[in-house]
Amino acid sequence: MTEQSVIKRKLQPFILIILGGLLFLSLSILSDRFLRGISIDLTEDSLYTLSGGTKETLKNLEEPIQVTFYYSKNLATPYPDLVSYGKRIEDLLKAFQAVAPNMIELSIIDPEPFSEAEDAAVEAGLSGAPLGDGSTLYFGLTATNSTNGEGNIPFLTEDRETFLEYDLIKLIINLETMERPKMTLITQLPLQYGIGGPQAALQGRSQPYVIYKQLQENFEIAELEKAFKEIPLDTDILTIAHPPSLNDEQLYAIDQYILSGGRALVFLDPHAESLDPNAFAPNSSDLGILLNSWGIEIPNNMVVGDASLAQRVQLDGFGPDSVKDFIFWLGIRDGFLAEDDIVTGAIDNLNIASAGIIKPLSDRTTNVTPLVETSTVSMLYDASRAVGTPDTDSLLRDLEPTAEAYTLAARISGNTASAFPDKTSENHLKTGNINLVVVSDTDLFDNRFWVQLQDLLGQQIIVPIAGNGSFILNLADHLIGSNAMLELRGRGISRRPFDVVDRMRREAEAKFLNEEQRLQARMTSVETRLAELESQKPDGATVISTEQEQEISIFRAELLETRKALREVKRNLRGDIDRLGSTLAVINIALVPILLIIFIGLRTYFRRKQTI
């Protein structure tokens, strides 16, 4: 072998490495240039794949839309997360353009400091984030069409990343929608003011419900006065949310509206927690004989408790012992939402509080289709037990599951008779086909149950933690025949609970709760008796008698023994969970690397064996 051949052979690995690096860089540049619209989405909710509703909306655009993304790319360089998010926004906008190339005109502008582009961003109403060096970072977009429609997103926050597609397509739909459908509202909830009602608004402390503001964006809302006598003829959908007490004339107006084919959303509640947090009695709502005419009933003054769907709540104090399952506050998740319904199939979870139940009547002529149900580990309680600060442990101990899944929300459809058969007016409708949805809870409107609110650059950022808003908006849209946004609203809201850990925790608490309660009562009794003994002294004596001292010693020993047993019970509450955590840690830290080492070793061994 010549010296030149030896040199070539030695250099060959380095040449291959260099060529491999050049090939990798070339493929990266080419793919970034030509394949940016191609991706593999492995997220559970397909957050990075355009939904069918988005594609349909873009393909049906009637006017060309100019979208301008103002992105201070150079200023964002020190912030890797922002750069990554900016790239995703660019990719999504280009995906929009790929679906409707003749209708979406995209511009991406870097508004450098003191430039005309920065002036344009300010004029467009975008909010800039001031940086330490005096410059301003812009990260928002505008959209306009040829019919003077315009809109913007002042600043695209990372907290809203999972809702990016929804925010963008909503902006585009709003440009196209010239006339919003009309929603007529009957309610005593302070939707447009928040807790405190009009008085809070007069003092500058109002905080409207987020769902009310979202409804305003999609509907023209007309709230009826308490003394209304009829439903306006131009109503596209009637929403009844915890109504005040209605007289027969008002109930008849609702009856005739629905029998005439009017669409309705009805939210009733045996105890509305959000209406008056300081109430001493259940605050309930009802529609009297209308429910029976629709083929259902909602038992008065009864709320449902569910041990399987109970939410964990922080009570007074700190530490793990202050966090309890509150069986009146339910976190409805997959499996308890109708998967085959277009509305509930598009959301993952709901948070509700002190809800009633919907019972179909045996002699009904309507179809009652459940949308939301409890688990079978549930039962009904008197609504008075939901008032104030309930004893969560007592509620759980009293739970005797009925093995029945109760309905919390249902579609009501089909032919039915009027609730007022004796009416003789000329235009009286005796029967009709109805189409409405009834929900046995109104607290799902309350901000505290489903959103987190944040302020950024004077802009309120809404981050949903449950699908309550999506549920209400989707129901309203679907009832009036608009399905474009249904799939998008629920994306990215689901929480990912540790189902196995959660199940183990509930089983442990159910197993040890009674024992803990018994030991706690015993310890309290011993402490009381001990205090009594130590406070008793013979008349005129400064010390206690020998008999009392012996008795005190016995009670102290019993107290120590009881405390030890109680600690053991509390330790057992987390025993299985801790063991599961240790097992997972061993698997992740040791087992997986060991398996990889064994695999690589065996692979190397067999390769060498084949070459021998």
Image (cartoon, rainbow, N blue to C red):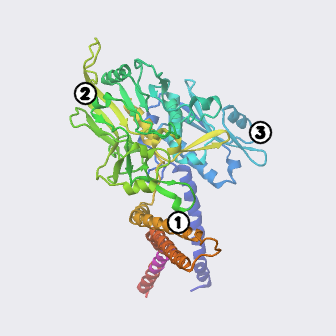
Drawn side of residue 153 relative to residue 95, left or right: right
Can see residue 553?
Answer: yes
- Mark-to-mark CA distance, 2 and 1: 65 Å
Identify the residue at the far top of this view.
426
Element marked by disc 3: loop
Asked which quadrant contains residue 412, the reply is top left
Which residue is disc 2 drawn over?
416
Residue toward you, 69 or 197:
197
Mark 2 vs mark 1: give the one in front.
Answer: 1
* Placement of the N terminus among the 4 image quadrants: bottom right
Q: Position of residue 261 (x, y in %)?
A: 32, 24
Foreground pick, 166 / 526: 526
Q: Tell me if residue 447 is in the magenta stretch.
A: no
Q: How far across and how far down the image is residue 467, in percent?
A: 46, 44
Which comes before the other along the chain, label 2 or label 1? 2
| Residue on which the image places disc 3 | 114
- Residue 528, label in figure: 1
